[in-house]
């Protein structure tokens, strides 16, 4: 009987997690750095699922970058709430 392969998070998952951690911390400089990393992630060659994850991550990061006061409106904006939930799904896809 074979043991299941250990879970290895994808690049999109790791970047989404880093962005969520930065946002939760409230550190504007770290949030901006993680937004830039997430928005600039390269495409995944040969892996359709990872490519979709990266496309979603880029779209979420792009939307979050457009909030003028991203850290000031954490609990008040439905669009930001959706972005955060999508990041959570990227971190734990299954």
Image: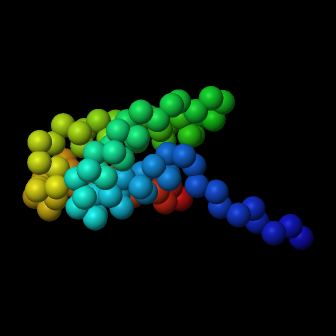
Asked if residue 57 is positioned above or below residue 82 in the image, the reply reads above
On screen, residue 90 versus residue 30, left or right, reads: right
Residue extending furthest toward the front: 29
Kindly indicate the quadrant of the structure image that contains residue 39.
top left
On screen, residue 26 versus residue 88, left or right, reads: left
Residue 73 picture location, percent across and down: 11, 55
Scheme of image coloration = rainbow
Image point (63%, 35%), residue name:
47
Residue 48 in sight: yes
Image point (41%, 33%), residue name:
40
Residue 28 picture location, percent across and down: 22, 53
On screen, residue 52 versus residue 9, left or right, reads: left
Total count of labels: 0
Residue 85 picture location, percent across and down: 32, 56
Residue 45 picture location, percent across and down: 62, 29
Q: Quadrant of the N terminus?
A: bottom right
Image point (43%, 57%), residue name:
17
Asked if residue 44 is positioned above or below residue 17 in the image, the reply reads above
Residue 89 in sight: no
Residue extending furthest toward the right: 1
Kindly indicate the quadrant of the structure image that contains residue 3.
bottom right
């Amino acid at each position: 009987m074979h043991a299941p392969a250990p879970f290895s998070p994808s690049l999109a998952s790791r970047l989404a997690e880093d962005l969520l951690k930065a946002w939760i911390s409230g550190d504007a400089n770290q949030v901006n750095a993680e937004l830039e990393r997430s928005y600039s992630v390269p495409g995944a060659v040969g892996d359709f699922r990872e490519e979709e994850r990266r496309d979603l991550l880029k779209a979420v990061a792009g939307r979050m970058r457009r909030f003028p006061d991203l850290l000031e409106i954490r609990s008040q904006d439905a669009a930001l709430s959706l972005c955060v939930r999508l990041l959570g799904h990227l971190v734990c896809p299954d």
